[in-house]
Amino acid sequence: MIKIYTTPTCPYCQLAKDFFQEKNLEFEEINVALDQEALKEMVYKSGQMGVPVIDIDGKIFAGFNRPEIEKFLRGK
């Protein structure tokens, strides 16, 4: 399960979503600009206020670090 915590104006959020779409990986996008409970959840999981925060099966990535995400996905 992939969750991406985003805001509408975040360019790195869009890059992350494009990446997962290119890889044909399903994800749930959560707009923390509209959902205060999701924002609290994101901060609790990551300790970060910035987006994107990406949760892949419980592994948290703060920001879109493509090489680290690809490495993690290869190991799954």
Image: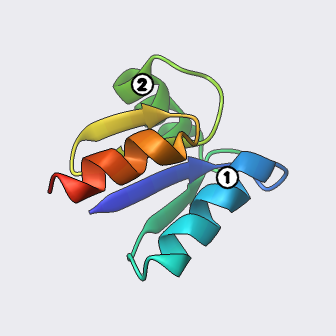
The image shows residue 33 at horizontal and vertical percentages of 71, 45
Query: Alpha-carbon distance for marks 1 and 2?
Result: 16 Å
**Residue plotted at (47% across, 44% down):** 67
Q: What kind of residue is marked 1? A: Cys
Identify whether 58 is placed above or below 15: above
Q: Is residue 6 left or right of residue 43?
A: right
Q: Is residue 32 left or right of residue 69?
A: right
Q: SS for tag 1? A: helix
Circle 1 residue: 13
| Residue closer to the observer: 29 or 70 | 70
| Residue closer to the observer: 58 or 40 | 58
**Residue plotted at (49% across, 40% down):** 37
- The tag on residue 46 is 2
| Residue at the outermost bottom position | 24
| Residue at the outermost right position | 9
Q: What kind of residue is marked 2? A: Ser
The image shows residue 54 at horizontal and vertical percentages of 45, 45
Q: Is tag 1's residue or tag 2's residue first in the polypeptide sequence?
A: 1
**Residue plotted at (71% across, 48% down):** 12
Look at the image and tell me whether residue 56 can be seen. Answer: no
